[in-house]
Amino acid sequence: MKRSLVTSKVLFAGLVTGLASVYGCSSGGGSGSNPFGSAGSSGSAGLSGSAGTSSSAGASGSAGVSGSAGVSGSAGVSASAGAGGGASTAGSTGTDGGAGTDGGTGGAGGMSMTGAAGTSGPLGDITKVVPSMGCGTPSTFTPGTTSGSQKIATMGTKPAKCGTAGADPSNCCADSNCAPWSYNREYFVTLPKGYDDTKAYPLVFEGPGCGGGGQDVYPLSYMGANNVNNTVIRVGLTPPPNDIGHATNPGQGCFDDKEGDSSVDWVFYEDLYDHLNATLCFDRNRVFSAGNSSGAWFSNELGCKYAGDPKRPVRGVMPNTGGLPSQAQYEPHCTSNPMAGMWVGETMDPENAFSNNVFAISRAMVANHCTATAFQTSDLPNDPNYPIGGGNADSVCKLVPNCPALYPLVVCLITGNQHASHDNVTNPGFSTFITGFENAPFLTQ
């Protein structure tokens, strides 16, 4: 049972059945040379919050190929006063070219990566900067400071409850609140110091764990400064109200991350992307999603649905703990387009089993046309190191070998039994990962 209007699917071979979709919620806050960029110092933001667990074992499923995201609604934008200044109304997005096809996978290249998979993307050559429509428009936000609470209106209608009479098994509602909805969603914007409205920066959407807000996200400290040494725009997202009736963690302030294609978060992402596209200057070919715990589930699912999207593409994901749902009533449909990714977690996490990310990584390996089609944690000791600095050993993070060079997949599996934010790994790790996209072969202009 899948939950999208599209019929084609990406099939996985060798995935272990029975992947758990259990997760708990926590709100979010070197040495050697890296193959994609120099190492930086670690950040120190703390991510704290209430914890909660849910269970319900899931059988591993195949990921689908995405069509358009869930029900979209009209958006209005307002903002409360804060360091970022007042809000402006959302402008319309520009027209986008059709999706390009990926080139064939080449032979093995350096760092045990497969040759280029092709540079064609939905917005043209993926190695070229595609400025947003907001470039040249002065921002109302103060550079180097996180804005006050911003709001954007979202609305939609969920389909019938799964399992009820008349419900479409391919498009049904897993949450307890299956009705028309309307929410003013909250977000926070952090511009880098020295923000230049004529320069297209990478854009990072970030989500906290359950109970956290859009201000409780990773600062992405790198080389002594936040925002990847003041080279990226960060947008922190607050989960929706508990009124959604979360399918597995009701009342805990989590993202709507067990609702497949009917999640209220997809309308939030699309409406907010369109607003930011009209008001900020960012590179539409370098949009990333990152998150902790529930925010990591959101990050995984955003990449699953929007990698290579013709209007709002996601270039890569950076989840800490979390996972990708594998149960039919919870999983969104995934695109077959390639994407980059960096996953962080512990071997014995008691709330978010790393097997949930194994499912996500394996899906990405198939979409990226890596030589292998199923991720095995037992292979990590023999995989190439991916140094991230920040006082971490070079071997903390590993590069999945024999994948296209333009779509690197990195895994940082930490020995331990905690459900933690791993700030000492995520801040330098995610920052190092993003920095790689500032240089060739990822950026050629």
Image (cartoon, helix red, strand yellow):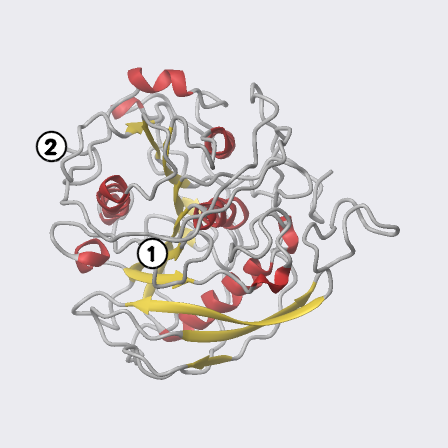
Identify which residue, 171 or 403, lies in the foreground. Answer: 171
User: Does 225 sit left or right of 275 as displayed?
Assistant: left
- In percent of width and height, residue 176 lies at 70, 55
- In percent of width and height, residue 289 lies at 40, 51
Location of residue 140 with respect to 206 vertically, above or below: below
User: Does 395 sit left or right of 13 as displayed?
Assistant: left
Location of residue 251 with respect to 300 vertically, above or below: below
Residue corresponding to mark 2: 31
Q: Mark 2 against mark 1, which lies toward the viewer?
A: 1
- In percent of width and height, residue 371 lies at 44, 21
Q: In terms of image quadrants, where is residue 409? A: top left
| Quadrant location, the N terminus | top right
Residue corresponding to mark 1: 217
- For image coordinates 51% across by 50% down, the residue present is 306
Identify which residue, 417 or 18, lies in the foreground. Answer: 417
Q: Amino acid at mark 2?
A: Ser
- For image coordinates 25% across by 71% down, the residue present is 198
Q: Amino acid at mark 1?
A: Val
Q: Residues within 10 Å of mark 2 (few under 14, many from 20)?
A: some
**Mark closer to the chain start, 2 or 1:** 2
Looking at the rendered structure, the secondary structure element under dot 2 is loop
User: Does 258 sit left or right of 201 as displayed?
Assistant: right
